[in-house]
Amino acid sequence: MRQITYRTEGLPSEPAIQTFLKARELEAQGADVVHLEIGEPDFQTPLHIRNALKVAVDRGETHYCDSQGICELREAIAERITAVRGVGVDANSVVVTPGLRPVLFYGALATLQDGDEGIYCDPAFAAFPAVIRFAGATAVPVPLRGGSGFRLDIGELRAAITPRTRLITLNSPHNPTGSVLTENDLREIEAIACEHDLFVLSDETYEDIFYESRPRSVIEFPRLRERSIVMSGFSKTYCMTGWRLGYAILPPTLVEPFVRITANSVSCTNTFVQYAAVEALRGPQDCVTSMVAEFRDRRDVLVERLNRMPGINCHTPAGAFYAFADVSGVGISDIELARILLEEAGVAALAGSAFGKQGEGYLRFAYTTSMQNIVKAMDRVECTVSALAEAKVV
């Protein structure tokens, strides 16, 4: 029998889901596990959005629709981005997809071919290097270092570019570190992309989850926007992870290829979910404001507790809902510490190694559970690492 192709072999398993499933197995055996592994808000989808979905279903919005997305949603997305970013967005530049993963794949497939190179930031959500390789290109990492707060070093970005480079991928606010790109970073990236005639794929799915000033978007920089795929969605901002709804804002040259790939891969995105998303964008936004305020409180408690523990140092994330803690001082690998915390302490967290070489020696804690659970988890983590520190001394 013929072997399975390299394209599928190169796709990673989802580390958060694998850890979640292991935690569920332990829970089925009677263990009490605090879940800090999944990047999924623990809040319910707001009522007005759920009601809009029911209305759409009862109205009969249960059939095929335009592969590009329903006109009403594309217009609502364009209106929202125009209002928030202060730049005009045409609804015709928007393509709606079933979640954000398709945008990653479509972006790589539309801009890369065999022999090309695509740049990603390390540590990274594992899908970034995977889709670059899936498209037949070489994935080239640019390190984000903990000592600089996981800021992108523009000099290292420039050094990574070769004549074969075709794509730069970005993620701000960043998973797993919570860092954000500054205005100066984006101006430098704009200059680099124009100088080398590169496409940029910018994942901005955490754009509404920030704790100081709103992070800048590539769409705000005209020369960068004309060569950028901007991706965002509804999973994080509106607690709609299971609804599977994302979108891309594209330069004119990429709209038709994206629509064609969409039509040939998924036909179209769920119709009645799109109508609910119109209500998410045009309806009340206080649900987002209150959720982010709660995330801020959780972040502050989590980071403060981690920084009190022996062998652990954690910077304060500026966006998203992850604390990426340096645990190298504990004296064991991040993989082993994550295992001990899950199996012996009942705390599910992700080993930083799952996010690339620069993630080694870190753990990612998602503060997407209640404050009570966060305090319980931190008590358990502190007890575990203190015992490891005492054992090391002995």
Image: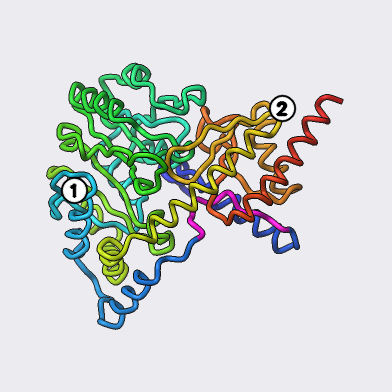
Display colour scheme: rainbow
User: What residue lies at 25% left-to-right and 75% top-to-bottom?
Assistant: 63
Dot 2, crowdedness within 10 Å: few (<14), some or many (≥20)? some
Q: Which of 15 and 348 is in front in this view?
A: 348
**Secondary structure state at the residue bearing disc 1:** helix
Where is residue 162? Give x, y as percent.
Answer: 29, 19
Q: Residue furthest right?
A: 394
Dot 1, crowdedness within 10 Å: few (<14), some or many (≥20)? some
User: What residue lies at 34% left-to-right and 21% top-to-bottom?
Assistant: 154
Q: Main SS type for the magenta part?
A: loop
User: What residue lies at 30% left-to-right and 83% top-to-bottom?
Assistant: 58
Residue 257: mark:
1
Q: Can residue 29 be seen in this view?
A: yes
Q: Is residue 259 visible?
A: no
The disc labelled 2 sits on which kind of residue? Answer: Gly
The disc labelled 1 sits on which kind of residue? Answer: Pro
User: Magenta includes 39?
Assistant: yes
Pick the quarter of the image with the C terminus.
top right
Against 93, residue 389 (above or below) is above
Q: Give the range drawn in magenta.
A: 32-42
Q: Nearer the viewer, residue 392 or 46?
A: 46
Against 255, residue 355 (above or below) is above
**Secondary structure state at the residue bearing disc 2:** loop
User: Magenta includes 69?
Assistant: no
Where is residue 307? Give x, y as percent.
Answer: 63, 33
Specify whether 271 is left or right of 177.
left
Residue 331: mark:
2
Q: Nearer the viewer, residue 284 or 189?
A: 284
Where is residue 149? Give x, y as percent.
Answer: 47, 27
Q: Nearer the viewer, residue 371 or 62?
A: 371
Specify whether 209 is left or right of 108.
right
